Amino acid sequence: MDLTEGTIQEKNDRAKRMMLWFGIISLIMSFAGLTSAVLVSRKREDWMHNFEMPNAFLISCVLIIVSSLTFILAKRALKSGNRSLTTMLLLVTFGLGIAFIYSQFYGFGEIVASGYNFTGPTSNVTMSFIYVIAFVHILHVIAGLISLLVVIYNHFKQKYNATEMLGMNLSATFWHFIDILWLFLFLFLTYLV
């Protein structure tokens, strides 16, 4: 396929999709670096091998999976022309994203309550990795929420319809990526830490 062919709009749409995928690939590489550092650090003598992840992190898995499902349903509702259902599902997705972040910070509270802090005398390398990986992921969820706010705003401005959904599709792709990323990170931290 010749990427120089097509209308200006088609070229712009392709460029936006490619930029999103370049960003996602760079995020994959960043988290691959963090998880590789965990794998290398696990061989240290001071590494904790018996730490159980907070229950709030498991709850956050459920929240982010459901939020991806509501985003999928919002796209389907828009394709079928049901704008009010689309609005409701987008707002539910946003609320679930906020609940995800809340559950993550609640999980940090559970870690602190069990006696481990990010730094200081009650910290260790294992906890520091868990804090950093989860917090960096939270930053990406915040980026996803900002993207979702833009989608909700544009939806209220009626910029999307069954044939014009590029912004919603890009936001959904990023949202699903951070969903899958958290599931991977949770399983990685649960079973390899």
Image: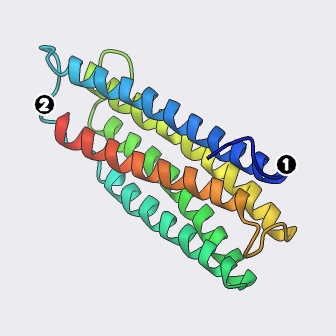
For disc 2, the marked residue is 49
Residue depicted at x 38% and y 19%: 119
Q: Indicate the position of residue 67 as horizontal and vertical percent values.
A: 51, 65
Residue 139 visible from this viewpoint? no
Q: Indicate the position of residue 156 as horizontal and vertical percent values.
A: 83, 70
Instruction: Inspect the image, locate mark 2, and give the three-letter code of the amino acid beneath it.
Output: His
Residue depicted at x 18% and y 36%: 192
Of residue 132 and residue 181, the one placed in the foreground of this image is 181
- Earlier in the chain: of badge 1 and badge 2, it is 1
- Does residue 36 lie above or below 148 as drawn? above
Residue 187, numbered label: none
Q: Quadrant of the C terminus?
A: top left
Q: How many tags in the picture?
A: 2
Q: Indicate the position of residue 163 as horizontal and vertical percent values.
A: 74, 72
Of residue 86 and residue 108, the one placed in the foreground of this image is 86
The CA distance from mark 1 to mark 2 is: 55 Å
For disc 1, the marked residue is 8
- Does residue 45 lie above or below 77 as drawn? above
Of residue 57 and residue 114, the one placed in the foreground of this image is 57
Residue 121 as seen in the image, left or right of residue 135: left
